[in-house]
């Protein structure tokens, strides 16, 4: 028997009401990494959310094995703070179903969650932390926003390209290139540190520490005006 499955499930209920305008953001209690289940997708850019969550879980000593709410879930402490780590197993475009169920089960609001996912419009090895935003053509994020009824949740966006590709769907599901594999450990360490910072220090401080724009990279406004649904 899976020892994780034998442990009692303790919801992280916060009873947080809908915040007033200008209210400080609540603590992050749920971390969701987006990706696709199965070995065929394991080493692809579209699974950076899964891979980052695995790295964070490894660093925190949390086993993400329990089947719950259409996801693989682990529960433990990150920097002394109780969190649930989850990898939806619905495939990317239906991720929101799992996320909605997880929020309901643990009595949390979307503002107590951080979503980790790949971003085709950001250069490889770059990262953006935001308190909220649009889906930007990412169907997994679209699904989450649709199911939870808001896009007002924190996210860590991990760059995989930063230039227009001919076939976005093919690009994000292709195996990592050789050069990317050599840099993957560094990227995952940085991403896990960023998520840890969001949990322990909050989004605003983490943005200051981890958001860096490469020379020649488009601003957020420019990206929003030129994005198209490529995958």
Image (tube, helix red, strand yellow):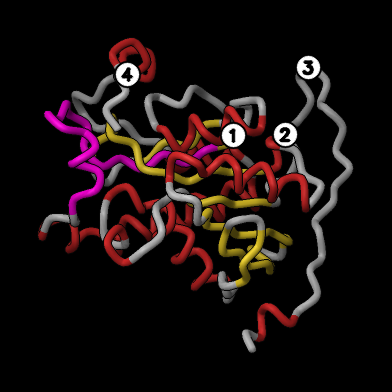
Earlier-in-chain disc, 4 versus 3: 3
Query: Could you say which disc has been placed on residue 204 in the image?
Result: 1
Q: Kindly report the distance in space between the C-alpha atoms of the residues bearing marks 2 and 4.
A: 26 Å
Tell me if label 1 and label 4 are in contact, CB under 8 Å: no
Tell me if label 1 and label 3 are in contact, CB under 8 Å: no
Q: Position of residue 3 (x, y in %)?
A: 66, 86
40 relative position to 35: left or right: left
Q: How many marks?
A: 4
Q: Which residue lies at the image location 69% right of the left edge and 35% below the top edge?
A: 111
Q: Quadrant of the N terminus?
A: bottom right
Is the residue 192 above or below the residue 211 in the image?
below
> From which residue to which does the magenta span run?
155-174
Magenta stretch encompasses residue 159 = yes
Q: Residues within 10 Å of mark 1 (few under 14, many from 20)?
A: some
Q: Kindly report the distance in space between the C-alpha atoms of the residues bearing marks 4 and 3.
A: 27 Å
Magenta stretch encompasses residue 30 = no
Q: Kindly report the distance in space between the C-alpha atoms of the residues bearing marks 1 and 2.
A: 9 Å
Tell me if label 4 and label 3 are in contact, CB under 8 Å: no
- Asked which quadrant contains residue 159, the reply is top left
Is the residue 18 above or below the residue 69 in the image?
above
Say which residue label 2 marks. 25
158 relative position to 99: left or right: left
Query: Could you say which disc has been placed on residue 223 in the image?
Result: 4
Q: Residues within 10 Å of mark 3 (few under 14, many from 20)?
A: few
């Amino acid at each position: 028997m899976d020892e994780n499955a034998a442990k009692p499930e303790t919801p992280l209920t916060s009873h947080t009401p809908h915040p007033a305008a200008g209210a400080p953001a609540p603590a992050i209690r749920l971390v969701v990494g987006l990706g696709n289940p199965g070995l065929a997708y394991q080493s692809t850019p579209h699974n950076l959310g899964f891979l980052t969550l695995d790295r964070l879980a490894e660093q925190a000593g949390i086993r993400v094995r329990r089947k719950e709410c259409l996801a693989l879930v682990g529960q433990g402490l990150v920097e002394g703070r109780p969190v649930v780590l989850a990898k939806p197993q619905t495939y990317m475009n239906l991720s929101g179903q799992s996320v909605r169920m997880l929020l309901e089960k643990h009595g949390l609001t979307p503002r107590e969650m951080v979503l980790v996912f790949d971003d085709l419009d950001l250069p490889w090895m770059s990262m953006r932390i935001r308190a909220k935003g649009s889906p930007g053509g990412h169907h997994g994020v679209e699904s989450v926003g649709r199911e939870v009824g808001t896009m007002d949740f924190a996210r860590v966006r991990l760059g995989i390209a930063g230039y227009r590709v001919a076939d976005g769907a093919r690009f994000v599901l292709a195996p990592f290139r050789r050069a990317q594999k050599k840099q993957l450990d560094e990227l995952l360490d940085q991403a896990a540190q960023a998520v840890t910072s969001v949990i322990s220090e909050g989004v605003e401080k983490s943005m200051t520490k981890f958001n860096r724009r490469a020379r020649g990279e488009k601003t957020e406004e420019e990206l929003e005006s030129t994005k198209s649904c490529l995958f």
